[in-house]
Image: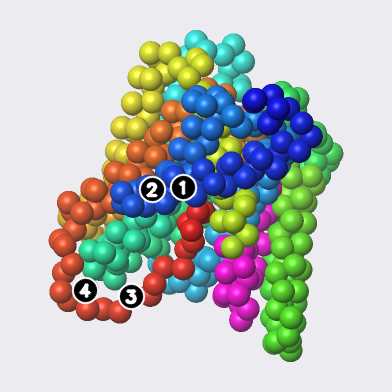
Amino acid sequence: MKEFLFGNDYSFLLQIAIILLATKVLSIFTKRISLPQIVGALAAGIILGPMVLDVVERNDLIIDLAELGVIVLMFSAGLETDIQELKKAGLASFVIALIGVIVPLAGGYFLSDLYNTEQDPEMAQLFWQNIFIGVVLTATSVSITVETLKELGALSSRAGNAILGAAVIDDILGIILLTVVISLGGKKSDGEETEKTFGSALLGDGVPSVILNILAFFIFAVAMAFAYHYFFKKWSAHSNENLRRYNIVTFAFCLLLSFCAEIFFGVADITGAFVAGLAVSGQKKSEYIVNRFNTLSYMLLSPIFFANIGLVMTLDGLTGDLILFMVLLIIVAVLTKIVGCGLGAKLMHYTNKESLQIGIGMVSRGEVALIVANKGTSVGLMNEKFMTPLVITVVFTTIITPILLKFVFSKKQPAEAAIAQAPSEEETPSE
């Protein structure tokens, strides 16, 4: 029966239908039990994949759609980044975000280095794999924190505002760090070195080439973003008809910038997608574009992206040492954010209680860490055996953050609860 259903040229239709239905059903279930919906989407991939039922094959189509899904997710993240609020975030949020990136990066690297000492004879590649696991731990997904703070009436508190500002800056720093690490240590999935790019053509291989590539990309990307921002502003000011054209042209711009990032500069395509989103952020028609892309994302691409991560997970090679590594990774993931962001808050003269609140508010990794981990695996920076521990770590931090926040924040303080708070516009992948 399985051969009949999945052994023909049209089986991809059935597989996509199964993924969409499974992610939706499990997302609804996790929402009903007060868990984030991405947990359900990940669980769907795990159940459908080789770890449990093994009914969905992780083929080229699924992988390509997942890659398109992550581009759309990062493009949407750029679209929804409030640049004006970013400017107002101030020194305090920057210091909190910076230390909150450095400490998890160091913690992830040293833990991975301790575990991987005798795992790989290629020490150079092993070094970058250790660094990359640290990069995954630097991510912060603030959506779960925001919903919890709204429930507690603390979103507009000093700690709440610091968390929001630091989370946005954390994303920017994470993208820059991801770009540098992939450019320096990344390989193609087949194990071959990446193709020659602008910098390597001029300077050859090595650090100078990578630095030139990154600088050239950011100069190019910023110039393109400003040019498209100006063009879009003028275009949208003189036209209110056929709004669909804005989506099409803007998405084409996103894909072109993502393509240029990978092919000409050796930079992750998701970096290009994020910059493309920033180019349109805050524009007159940006809310319309955000809504349409959220629809595209949660109807098809996001479920496939999250399910694809679940499909990678397997019990093969899950030794006792790897389970111990996973437990330690969870502990490091939680403590390094609390310590790093809490220390940054304390340096900026927040109280001990506020520093603890800020540190806990930055613990959740969510979809951001999954995007980074998926990208690292695809470019050969990380062995696939680490995907299972990382996904479980992401799920744990996403679940534990609201629980810890309810312990450190007073329940619905009257003065703060009375303050009108803007509703969250973020769409989960399965809504």
Rounded to the nearest angstrom, the CA distance separating label 4 from label 2 is: 31 Å
Query: What span is in magenta?
Result: 267-294
Question: What amino acid is found at the position of numbered circle 4 in the picture?
Answer: Glu
**First along the sequence among labels 3 and 2:** 2
Residue 261 image label = none
Q: Is residue 388 visible?
A: yes
Residue 29 image label = 2
Residue 178 horizontal/vertical position (percent): 57, 43
Reply above or below: 388 against 417. above
Residue 289 horizontal/vertical position (percent): 63, 71
Q: Residue at x 39, y 35 (%)?
A: 393
Look at discs 3 and 2 and give the one toward the viewer: 2
Give the crowd class for mark 3: few <14, some 14-19, many >=20 residues within 10 Å.
few
Image-based side of 145 in relation to 280, left or right: left
Q: Which residue was labeled with disc 1?
A: 25
Question: What amino acid is found at the position of numbered circle 1 in the picture?
Answer: Val
Rounded to the nearest angstrom, the CA distance separating label 3 from label 2 is: 28 Å
**First along the sequence among labels 4 and 3:** 4
Image-based side of 377 in relation to 229, left or right: left
Q: Residue 395 sits in which quadrant?
A: top left
Look at discs 3 and 1 and give the one toward the viewer: 1
Give the crowd class for mark 1: few <14, some 14-19, many >=20 residues within 10 Å.
some
The answer to which of 187 and 96 lies nearer the viewer is 187
Q: Which residue was labeled with disc 3?
A: 421
Q: Is residue 276 magenta?
A: yes
Rounded to the nearest angstrom, the CA distance separating label 2 from label 1 is: 6 Å
What element does badge 1 sit on?
helix
**First along the sequence among labels 4 and 2:** 2
**Farthest bottom residue in view:** 238
